[in-house]
Amino acid sequence: EEVDRVCKELKATFLGSDVYWAALRSLTAEQVGEEAARHLGLDITEEQQRLLLSTLCSPARVSWRAPGIRTTLPRKAVDGPPGEARHDDAAELEGVTQEDLAAVALLTHFGVSAELAPLLARLALTWRHNSF
């Protein structure tokens, strides 16, 4: 219910709230802290999370056009020399960073460090591409 509300407030999320809920439940208590772990009902072990991330497939990046994803292109891709082909898909560029805005918002909502956003986004993509 809380995850759904946070996702709706963002208006543009890359994945559905059910996927983000599964990803949140795939964080360990050590990663999020005691209070957030209790609130989220976390019981996954570090080993289970490692297996989840290492045995199932998920893309390294998503299209820069994806809703709810903030993509930062390396300066050379944006300001390349005249006549140089520009890339349409950020997933093909080195030095591209992507931030899942829902992952950041959800972690902040539950009082967890936003530094875990890349991990939460990776877990969400893993769940999306292997379960739903």
Image: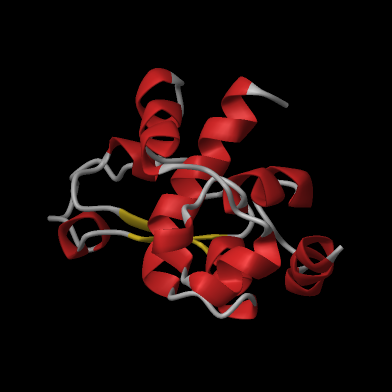
In this view, 98 is above or below 124: below
Q: Residue at x 22, y 60 (%)?
A: 74
Give the quarter of the image for residue 71.
bottom left
Nearer to the camera, 7 or 23: 23
**What is the quadrant of residue 81 in the picture?**
bottom left
Scheme of image coloration: secondary structure
The location of residue 29, given as percent across then percent down, is 48, 59
Side of 76 where 5 appears, left or right: right
Q: Viewed as shown, does residue 51 lie left or right of 132? A: left
Please identify the quadrant where the C terminus is shown: top right
Q: Residue shown at 45%/42% (left/top)?
A: 45
Label tally: 0
Front residue of 104 and 113? 113
Res. 63 in view = no
Residue 90 coordinates in the image, percent (x, y): 36, 45
Foreground: 61 or 122?
122
Q: Answer with the quarter of the image where residue 84 lies.
A: top left
Q: Residue 4 in the image: state x and y as whole percent.
A: 82, 61
Residue 19 drawn at (x, y percent):
69, 43
Quadrant in which the N terminus appears = bottom right
Residue drawn at the location 66% of the way across and 43% of the way down: 22
Please determine whether, in this image, residue 21 is positioned above or below residue 111: above
Is residue 42 left or right of 16 when viewed as pictured? left
